Amino acid sequence: MNINNDIKAVLINKEELEKRILEISKQISSDYLDKNPVMICLLKGSISYFAHLCEHIYIPLEYEFLRASSYHGATSSGEVKLLHVPTISLKNRHVIIIEDIIDTGITLSAIKKVMMEMQPASIEITTLLDKPSRRQVNDIVPKYVGFTIPDEFVVGFGLDFNEKYRNLPYIGILKEEIYQK
């Protein structure tokens, strides 16, 4: 089975991803010079974006990981479950949340609320993909956006459907017959 055969179209190719992530890395390095930010990677989907982003940031920073879930299959359940929270203190720290895709914003809104209780100096969000047409909350405005995309079901570069397709080196639109089974 070749997973590429399940892709209707390539939305963002590998070269476009690399170029945009490098631009965001440079901007974060400039914006957070002398701030030693904490980069919080939301597992599992953000790991590819996180790794590529951090390898090009040239300032001191710390990593942390958080795991939350609101998806079951192809749709958000609306109920957010935090499966892992930061283990280091975020008090008076500059926090950057790294997300793979912002869709409804419900998950990220819940995560941001938990982070605010930890009293950081600031919280910003970077997302590889933003799908504003599906947003259901108003308090999520990412500072660093890789690409704004249409309302399509996308996979690749960390994004999955039922734990498959994360390893694709591009962002592709999944064929409807795959996720509507």
Image: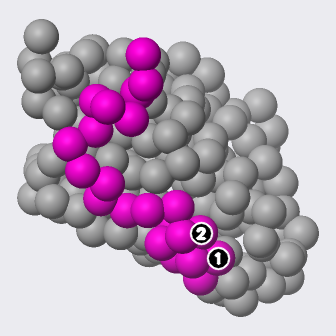
Farthest-out residue, bottom: 30
145 horizontally vs 106: left or right: right
Q: Which residues are magenta?
A: 1-24
Give me the disc on residue 14: none
Please give the name of the residue rendered at 80% of the width and 63% of the height, measured from the top-left corner: 55
Left or right of residue 118: residue 54: right
Which residue is tagged 1?
A: 22
Q: Name the residue at the right extreme.
A: 60
Tally the marks: 2
Q: Is residue 71 left or right of residue 31?
A: left
Q: Is residue 5 magenta?
A: yes
Residue position for label 2: 18
Relative side of 120 to 178, left or right: right
- Identity of the residue furthest to the top in this view: 181
Name the residue: 67% across, 63% down: 53
Whether residue 105 appears in this view of the structure is no
**Residue sitting nearer the eye, 70 or 75:** 75
Label 1: how many residues lie within 10 Å, few (<14), some (14-19) or many (20+)?
A: some
User: Dot 2, crowdedness within 10 Å: few (<14), some or many (≥20)?
Assistant: some
Report the magenta stretch's main SS.
Answer: helix
Inspect this view and state whether residue 10 appears: yes
Magenta-drawn stretch contains 8: yes
Instruction: Write the residue at 83% across / 69% down.
Output: 36
Per the model, the C-alpha gap separating discs 1 and 2 is 6 Å
